[in-house]
Image (spheres, rainbow, N blue to C red):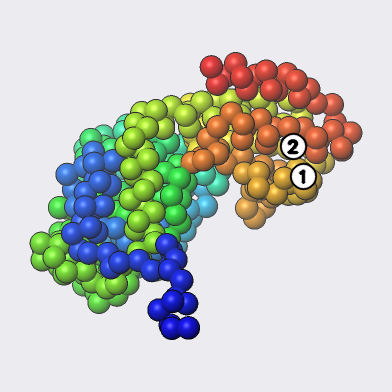
Amino acid sequence: MSEESTAVTHPFLDLPPLSAARFASIEDRVARLLDTRQDVVIMQGEALLPLEGAIRGTAGPGTTALNVITGPYGQTFGDWLRDCGATVIDLAVPFHTAVRAEQIREAFAEHPGIDFVSLVHAEAATGNTNPVAEIGEVVREHGALFYLDAVASVGAEPVLPDAWGVDLCVIGAQKAMGGPAGVSAVSVSERAWARMAANPKAPRRSYLSLLDWKERWIDGGRAALLHAPAQLEMLALQACVERIETAGLDAVMARHARAAAATRAGAVALGGLEPYVHEAQDAAPVATTLRTPPGVVAADLVSRSLEADPALPLAAGGGALAQEMIRVNHYGADATPGAVRSCLAALGGALAGKGLVVDLGAALGAVEDAWR
């Protein structure tokens, strides 16, 4: 038998090369998703790659950064900024709320030398979301560079770099976009490119380097890629953008908003749990965080809830939050009434198993009402 007759093709393995033109066309579709005229660079890795690369490219010893902390990613950004030599002013707010534009304004008044602001749009880990449009107005008034982590929010709520004055907007495909984790993108303003070009510490000839993409890809007319692209991830990114385009971005965002409202209402009606984020306006549409009753460890409750169905989008909070926080991840394919009902049913069963009184019927009714 010949080698030709025994060879088996595989759709994931035997892929034709991804051309520079195809790569550029996917970047263009991402730009349309963000309604931006800025340069969009697709990075060949999980979103931490452009998140770190953008900070290291634009921050250095002369930078005075206002770093807003509404969850664990804000803490990480502060660490990177300090490592770059920047002077960092942390503005931390309780994780059960959101930062306000007035707090940003007060920080500028107290520290007029601030020239860089870092912010997470939606913190999936803590379940809050921040009012970027209002914050962007304050940042523009003071001429600071605005860096935004929109990894969790894109696809679930508006993300508008141009309208909001965001200079570096990082997105990832793995949450509300319903795509793969191994590919991400960043939109870069002309001001941000200029800041990088003037920064002697900006990564160059490095996997973290955005300047490499600017000089060798964008300035070269997007004719030759820097390296072999991650084909599977790029094709999956294209597919998830196509799916959003077909359904309509407004419809996809509305589905996430309904999932958040239904989860919040259902949890309140269930009993035993309460929303971790106090105000509904501060709650992210990608994930609803819930506080467990006194004496009930969140990680244990989640473990019991997953025994019947390990695929449920439930998780305990990270670190110390594992004691008191449960996260219902209703994003992407899980932004559905069925996923919300299943999560609440599992949590209700786990709570009842601990002797707490719950009302699953009321919870499911509240889900249906909120979804409608």
Mark 2: amino acid: Ala
Q: In this view, does 194 lie above or below 276?
A: below
Residue 264 in picture, x, y percent from top left: 61, 27
The residue that label 1 is drawn on is 308
Q: Residue at x 60, y 16 (%)?
A: 369
Local crowd size for mark 1, using a 10 Å CA cut-off: few (<14), some (14–19), many (≥20): few
Left or right, residue 297 beside residue 127: right
Q: In this view, does 149 lie above or below 155?
A: below
Residue 180: quarter of image: bottom left
Residue 159: quarter of image: top left
Q: Which residue is drawn at 69% across and 22% down?
A: 364
Alpha carbon distance from label 1 to label 2:
8 Å
Report the front residue among 108 and 355. 355
Find numbered disc 2 in the image and state the secondary structure of the residue it sits on.
helix
Q: Which residue is drawn at 53% across and 17% down?
A: 372
Q: Which residue is drawn at 51% across and 26% down?
A: 258
Residue 212 in picture, x, y percent from top left: 21, 69
Marks 1 and 2, the one that precedes in the sequence: 1
Mark 1: amino acid: Ala
Left or right, residue 156 beside residue 234: right
Residue 48 in picture, x, y percent from top left: 42, 60
Residue 106 in picture, x, y percent from top left: 35, 37
Q: Which mark is residue 355?
A: none
Q: Is residue 114 in view?
A: no
Q: Is residue 292 above or below residue 179?
A: above
Left or right, residue 239 beside residue 79: left
The residue that label 2 is drawn on is 346
Say whether marks 1 and 2 touch (CB < 8 Å): yes
Q: Residue furthest front?
A: 1
Task: Mark 1 vs mark 2: give the one in front.
Answer: 1
Local crowd size for mark 2, using a 10 Å CA cut-off: few (<14), some (14–19), many (≥20): many
